[in-house]
Image (cartoon, rainbow, N blue to C red):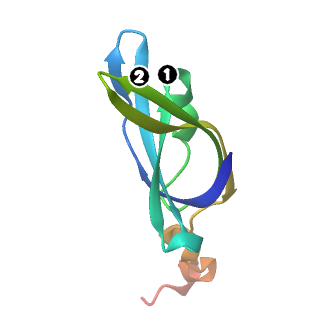
């Protein structure tokens, strides 16, 4: 499955055991009233979002994973791949480079 949305929040990697770590990524879908959706990254996939920023538009490919523990049932959206479609604009991107010309100093 895949989904396109904007990165809303990135969690820190949490080491659960010596060989198991997890990290969360929250994406908002503008076509669904900005509904936040949590994806989980496991082990070596945790580093996939290191270079992704809040506000980036991304396309994620994921799998729906369910499990049962002590009679309770859980569902996770396990992130498999992520592709940045467009980067979020930053303040430095919005500054007009002509304003930074040192020849135009007012003194």
Compared with 75, 102 (above or below) is: below
Residue 101 spot, x, y in % from top left: 58, 78
- Do we see residue 57 in this rendering? no
Q: Which residue is mark 2?
A: 21
**Residue 43: image tag:** 1
SS state under label 1: helix
Q: Nearer the viewer, residue 1 or 12?
A: 1
| Quarter of image, res 88 | bottom right
Q: Residue at x 38, y 33 (%)?
A: 73
Closer to the N terminus: mark 2 or mark 1? 2
| Quarter of image, res 106 | bottom left
Q: Residue at x 42, y 10 (%)?
A: 19
Residue 62 spot, x, y in % from top left: 62, 40
Q: Which quadrant of the rendered structure holds the N terminus?
A: top right
SS state under label 2: strand
Residue 35 spot, x, y in % from top left: 46, 65
Residue 29 spot, x, y in % from top left: 55, 65
**71 to the left or right of 45:** left
**Residue reaching furthest to the left:** 70
């Amino acid at each position: 499955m895949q989904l396109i949305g904007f990165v809303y929040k990135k969690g820190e990697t949490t080491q659960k055991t010596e060989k198991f770590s997890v990290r969360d990524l929250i994406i908002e879908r503008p076509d669904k009233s900005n509904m936040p959706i949590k994806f989980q990254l496991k082990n070596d996939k945790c580093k996939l979002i290191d270079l992704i920023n809040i506000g980036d538009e991304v396309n994620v490919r994921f799998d729906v994973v369910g499990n049962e523990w002590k009679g309770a049932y859980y569902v996770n959206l396990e992130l498999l791949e992520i592709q940045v479609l467009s980067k979020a604009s930053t303040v430095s991107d919005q500054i007009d480079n002509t304003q930074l010309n040192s020849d135009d100093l007012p003194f």
